[in-house]
Image (cartoon, grey):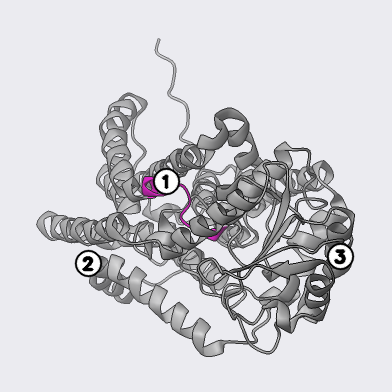
Amino acid sequence: MLAEPPPPALRYGPSGHRAAPATAGGSAPYWRRLLPVVALLVLITRIPSFRHPLWSPDEGYLAVQARMLADGGALYETVVDRKPPLLPWLYEAVLALFGDGSPYAMKVLAAVAHLLTAALLAAVARERWGDRAGRTAGVLHPLLSVGLNPEDTQAATFEVFILPFTAAAIWCAGRGRPGAAGLAVAGALLTKQTGGAVLVPVLWLLWHSAPGRAGLPRLAAGLALPVLAAALLTDPSGFLFWTVTGSAAYAAFTGSGLHMASRGLANSALLALACSPLLAPLVRARRTAPGGTARGGTADLWVWLAASAVAVVAGFHFFGHYFLQLVPPLVLLATAALRPLPREQAASALLTSVCVCALFVTWGILAPRPELAHAQRIADAVRARTAPTDRVLVWGIHPETYWLADRTPASRYLTAGLLTNYSGGRDGPRVGEKYAMAGAWPVLVAELRSRPPALVVDDSRGGPYAPGRLPTLRALLARQYRPLPATVDGAVLYVRSPGG
């Protein structure tokens, strides 16, 4: 006598709109056909990332942090940043395995992160709406994930590694696994604070089911335990300060309002262009969705999109890479919007998306990187004027200079931003010594006195964080250093004065 088949997995959320689950026998061939296609798309869309060792200052910051950690530094003590620890640890591990090739190895891992995200989104769409929807979601993610400035999409930075965690959180919550969903939310949160926004749709999914509400303690445990472990593995007070309490000035809505608004509008326009073939179906689906809490099975996705939009706005900086957090919910919403369309019309929208994606990939391949070239010229000058064992201080916003020069930073503060609140172009009234991270200037002075750098590079180039506007740094340079007569690409190099 044949045994009865096991009951289907418990589903939370808009269960009335889910497709019948695929049989186990049909699942493996489905993924064997889909994953190679998605992997190929990810590989093609990530080709520009391998053009340069570093695409953005964030990559440079993480690479330098990895070296400092590998040399015995301690996170949130002698190695500091406003970000959680997961990505610095990953960079450190990759550096240990691949040495100076680690930036390119990280680009491979970024591609893997996109592949995992696409696969998870495909799994969510397939469970809700069937095989065709799964294929659509899997293909759409790599197409939309490059729909911003290449500097924002091709760099192996925080937002890229948030994506698989957020997609996993939604997938786990939808399958009735609150503990696993909590772990995924913790992974996103420990990659970047705004990754925690996915907790909102996860809670929505669980709350709209009686079994889901019963699983809330497991969700809380899955979320809290990794965060507590990360705090204990670092310095608990430092972890709290650098990731939460010490960033009030960074997140304040002051300074350069017009500049930040224009950046936000520009990046919104770029993402809208990437999504342009899908906007009409999305609007139509939103207008015609049936009433009720499920909103046609996409209510949690709209909640996810709204929570991600709040995360993008948080801090009022509107960097392009922040917008990557919008891509997974947009992919699933677009997938749902394409479902009722005739096959030919849906295929036309996807083909147009491929063409738009090709424009962004071409932009990435051809785009110049003037700031990277600038950092390389300064790095060449630093290398020519210092020994490999010398420490240097690069006063600016390009920490990649340390990596390119292969020199040890003279301070734990790798950019002027942490010491002046010059945060990604913010140059209003709240830039200066008094707006630095609490206690930062005494630490900097102690570092420079105990082990004076052999060379100081003023790379402010007239910016609001220039040494002339900072009494402590200005006095230190006047006492112990003298400027070289020739500048390097606008940067002023200071060497130690005789007897300094």
Query: Residue, x 82% and y 56% (percent of image)?
Result: 452
Is disc 3 placed on a helix, strand or loop? helix
In the image shown, does 462 or 59 lie closer to the viewer? Answer: 462
Q: Residue 114: which disc? A: 1
User: Disc 1 versus disc 3: distance between alpha carbons?
Assistant: 42 Å
- Foreground mark, 3 or 2, reads 3
Rendered image quadrant of residue 119: top left
Was residue 225 drawn as part of the magenta stretch in this picture?
no
User: Disc 3 versus disc 2: distance between alpha carbons?
Assistant: 55 Å
- The image quadrant where one finds the N terminus is top left
**Residue that carries the numbered disc 3 in the rendered image:** 445
Was residue 52 drawn as part of the magenta stretch in this picture?
yes
- The image quadrant where one finds the C terminus is bottom right
- Foreground mark, 1 or 2, reads 1
Q: Is residue 97 above or below residue 403?
A: above
Is disc 2 placed on a helix, strand or loop? helix
Question: Seen from this angle, which residue lies furthest front?
Answer: 498
Q: Earlier in the sequence, mark 1 or mark 2?
A: 1
Query: Residue, x 28% and y 36% (percent of image)?
Result: 34
**Residue that carries the numbered disc 2 in the rendered image:** 277
Is disc 1 placed on a helix, strand or loop? helix
Estimate the x, y position of residue 227 in percent, counting from the top left: 74, 48
- Foreground mark, 1 or 3, reads 3
Q: Earlier in the sequence, mark 3 or mark 2?
A: 2
Magenta residues, as a range? Answer: 49-57
Q: Residues within 10 Å of mark 1 (few under 14, many from 20)?
A: many
Residue type at numbered disc 2: Pro
* Relative horizontal placement of residue 480, taking residue 130 as reference (left or right): right
Q: Is residue 241 above or below residue 48?
A: below
Q: Is residue 15 above or below residue 268?
A: above
Residue type at numbered disc 1: His
